[in-house]
Image (cartoon, grey):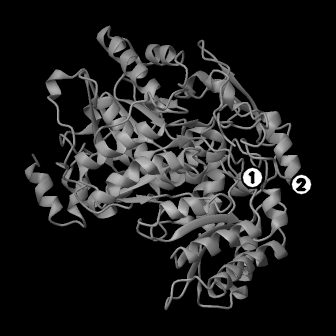
Amino acid sequence: MLSKKLEKILNTVQKPGRYTGGELNSVIKNRESVKIRYAFCFPDTYEIGMSHIGMKILYSLVNARSDTWCERVFAPWVDMEERMREAGLPLYALESGDAIAGFDIIGFTLQYELSYTNMLNMLDLAGLPVRSRDRKSLTPLVIAGGPCVCNAEPVCEFVDLFLPGEGEEVTNELIDLLIGYKEKGAGKSEFLRAAAEIEGVYVPSLYDVSYNGDGTVASVTPRGGAPEKVKKRVVRDLDKMFFPESFVVPSIEIVHDRTTAEIFRGCIRGCRFCQAGFIYRPIREKSPEVIDRQCRSICATSGYDEISLSSLSSSDYTRMEELLSLLIPWTDREKTNIALPSLRADNFKKELMDRLTGIRRSSLTFAPEAGTQRLRDAINKNLTEDEILSTARQAFAGGWTSVKLYFMIGLPTETDEDVLGIAGLAQKVVDEFYNNPDKPKGKSVNVSVSVASFVPKPFTPFQWEPQDSIEELLKKQELVRSSVKTRKISLSFHKTNTSRLEAVLARGDRRLADVIETAWRGGCRFDGWDDMFRFDIWEQAFSECSLSMDFYANRRRSFDETLPWEHTDYGIGRSFLERENKKARENAATPNCREKCAGCGANSLNGGECHALFKGLD
């Protein structure tokens, strides 16, 4: 039940449905009958957080325990934050309305670096100190997972422990440990030392970092029995992995307002800029029968009429024909759409399109990333212009009239010719439509071109590379813009300032904690939102902390430099990443994992197995 104070506030803010709870399938428990209360925090708005499948999975997994109650918490928008602070209303969980400062675990999922100030703001709204060292008691324990924790160093001062890797198993082990230490009245430091012994748990306070005179990391030294390297956690068998029978149905429209079914984890491609393609390895697939059963359950309990088959590259799922044979009969009957995001232009086969003839045609999305073949080879995209145009030809003949193309500028080894190639390739896709005798009659084509700026990320072959300066990126944006000659092509560009800050935070070290806190105290929050981003405040924060953005974003790192994240083991060998970096300089591609194993090392995390070379594959 909403408090009177909250009811009064909700009448004055945008989208009050973000803050009320009470949705279908949300879990309500007796607070007196559980041993652990878990606040699962997504440091962005309700509409974004409720679209995230990882949150849906872990919310249901924790609530499957009778001794634990997991509730959802999202970052309130600025109008709601202002009213809460005025009224003295602390940050609360949606299911109970209780203040999260009284919970046992406050868990954040860190999906992107520009959410860091929101995490601090949420802790402050909860009435808690933002620094881990200032939270003396065992609970609330502040933890974090998600892709950003592959380099957790910039936010180490704020979080008690991190969960690198996959959370389905380690979360329950951590809860079990906390219950035991709570019952025996143990202190925080004692618990953290014990937690560090669990595979897939990183306790930053148990590691000392020293720096060289030039500002680079000299060493990272564990103490208190902590492992020298923290190995990420991996779920070996996705068919046996926990998956919810129902999802919470949002009370307002969200970003991805549909149900989602994960079909496999990992990626076979090895694009040298792509962090997700490396940190989610090794490859593991779900069987079609399990996916079908999970889709049926979620649709039946939620009422959704669209299923998104989620993975890093849907068309790389080896058993797609079998899966669609199971899904299409009942989804056709129930008028449920199947969405296939993350398709690749080199394996979008005619047979797949034929199976999709009864499915609603939205825009097809492909990611050439680079405008020339030379640069696509350098970044290991393993995609030719002929494959892109052939796929467009098939799609147009099959009734599609809208194509989205994703590119990057600022990639290592890039030249002006590569930049101009972006508009050139988009124009060829437009021409393919009008030269196609089987195109939809009486319709025109739209090719949407989205151009991002390259951001070097940890655990990729390009982790040592510098990012282009803002001036260089703006020059390249104008080069693309001036070379587009038709209204059939619509252009959009990522903001260069946000890409710069993302690069800084992605490869940062522990000293950035002071910068992040200074920027937050200066008013920064929702940094991923263009209308909220205050680059001037971030620049001032770096100046006040006597640190340089150039040092983190625009400096080439040498292969013998100790990187801030090297005490975290994601299974990807350093020597492999170095080899791939050198091959980029030679414009040499590496075959995908199904053609030939490149020896990345990720199979070591899965008992020596990698399902990239799937049995029975032609």
Q: Residues within 10 Å of mark 2 (few under 14, many from 20)?
A: some
Q: Residue furthest right?
A: 586
Asked whether the viewer can see residue 44, the reply is no
Q: Secondary structure at mark 1?
A: helix
Asked whether the viewer can see residue 102, the reply is yes
| Res. 585 mark | 2
Counting from the top left corner in percent of width and height, residue 153 is at 60, 38
What residue type is disc 2 on? Answer: Arg
Foreground disc of the pair 2, 1: 2
Counting from the top left corner in percent of width and height, residue 325 is at 44, 49
Q: Residues within 10 Å of mark 1 (few under 14, many from 20)?
A: some
What residue type is disc 1 on? Answer: Phe
* Front residue of this view, candidates 238 and 126: 238
Position of the N terminus, as image quadrant, is: top left
**Residue that label 1 marks:** 551
Counting from the top left corner in percent of width and height, residue 490 is at 58, 82
How far is the residue under mark 2 from the one under mark 1? 23 Å
Tell me: 512 left or right of 133: right
Counting from the top left corner in percent of width and height, residue 30 is at 14, 29
- Residue 455: image quadrant is bottom right
Residue 373 to residue 429: above or below: above
Q: Secondary structure at mark 2?
A: helix
Tell me: 87 left or right of 583: left
Position of the C terminus, as image quadrant, is: top right
Residue 352 to residue 302: above or below: below
- Residue 382: image quadrant is bottom right
* Front residue of this view, candidates 153 and 269: 269
